[in-house]
Image (cartoon, coloured by chain):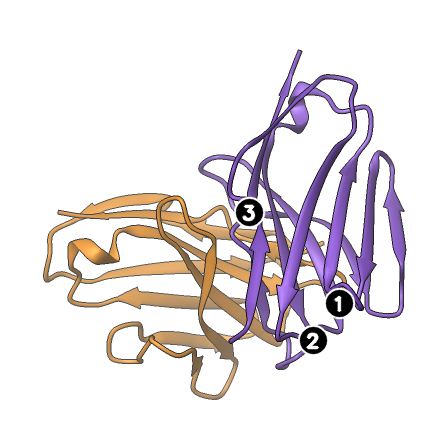
């Protein structure tokens, strides 16, 4: 069966360091992968989309890689700040219409 | 990107009753998506709503329990019917934005007592 795995344990890092979050999937051939940020009590906010033919994408302090052979995406936040503390969700799409399937999310805590 | 107004933001309901959640989008969109997020869990797609046709439900969700309306290209409602405590969750609507990410409403936090 299809599965998307994100580290369910919270990731704690020091301010200024690079945070790296992992998204692994099985039994999927997604056309694209997306990353979202979700704060408590709020809906997810779109951050980045990377397509299957792209290896890497950047946006300001964010970088996403997509390895379709390993079936893995890495999400990096450089020079992390306490304001980056949130839950980050990966989502796969493109298999069935416009449907998105979400991973369980990883909570990031950036300490000052 | 699109802006979605979702309401109510939260509600506490008695078991056996129904709640209708509304989402208004500031632009016309073909498809609207309804998700459920149970406490501490990720998002699960309930159904996809197209204007002018019946919604398409995902496995485990049925129209009798979660009827959806889509009267025009900017509006949709989701009703949670005959509620039980297991329906306590956050419900979210979403639209795709120009093939580059999805915009979500702020969510409806439902507690069934």
Residue found 78% across the figure and 22% down from its top? A17
Chain with colour orange in the figure: B
Are discs 2 and 1 less than 8 Å apart at CB?
A: yes
Q: Quadrant of residue A72?
A: bottom right
User: Mark 1, chain letter?
Assistant: A
Residue found 57% across the figure and 56% down from its top? A5
**Residue tagged 2:** A94
x then y, percent, for residue A112: 67, 11
Residue A79 visible in this rendered orientation of the protein: yes
Please tell me how crowded label 3 is: few (under 14), some (14-19), or many (20+) other residues with Cα within 10 Å. Answer: many
Q: Quadrant of the N terminus of chain B?
A: bottom right
x then y, percent, for residue B30: 62, 76
Residue B27 visible in this rendered orientation of the protein: no
Which element type, helix, strand or loop, lies under badge 3?
loop
**Residue tagged 1:** A32
Residue found 66% across the figure and 79% down from its top? A95
User: Mark 2, chain letter?
Assistant: A
Q: Is residue A19 shown above or below B36? A: above
Are discs 3 and 2 less than 8 Å apart at CB?
A: no
Chain with colour purple in the figure: A
User: Mark 3, chain letter?
Assistant: A
| Sequence-wise first label, 3 or 2 | 2
x then y, percent, for residue B95: 60, 64
Mark count: 3
């Amino acid at each position: 069966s299809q599965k998307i795995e994100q580290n369910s344990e919270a990731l704690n890092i020091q301010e200024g360091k690079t945070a790296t979050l992992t998204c692994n999937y099985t039994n999927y051939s997604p056309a694209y992968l997306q990353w979202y940020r979700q704060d408590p009590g709020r809906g997810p906010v779109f951050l980045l989309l990377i397509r299957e033919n792209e290896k890497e994408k950047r946006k300001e302090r964010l970088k996403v890689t997509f390895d379709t052979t390993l079936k893995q995406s890495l999400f990096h936040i450089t020079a992390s700040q306490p304001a980056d503390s949130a839950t980050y969700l990966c989502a796969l799409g493109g298999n069935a219409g416009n449907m998105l399937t979400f991973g369980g999310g990883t909570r990031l805590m950036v300490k000052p | 990107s699109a802006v979605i107004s979702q309401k109510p933001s939260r509600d506490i309901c008695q078991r056996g009753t129904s709640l209708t959640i509304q989402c208004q989008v500031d632009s016309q969109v073909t498809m609207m998506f309804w998700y459920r997020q149970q406490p501490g869990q990720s998002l699960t797609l309930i159904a996809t709503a197209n204007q002018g046709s019946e919604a398409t439900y995902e496995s485990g969700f049925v129209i009798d329990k979660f009827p959806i309306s889509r009267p025009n290209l900017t509006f949709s409602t989701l009703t949670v019917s005959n509620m039980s405590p297991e329906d306590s969750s956050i419900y979210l609507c979403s639209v795709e934005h120009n093939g580059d990410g999805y915009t979500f409403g702020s969510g409806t936090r439902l507690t069934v007592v």
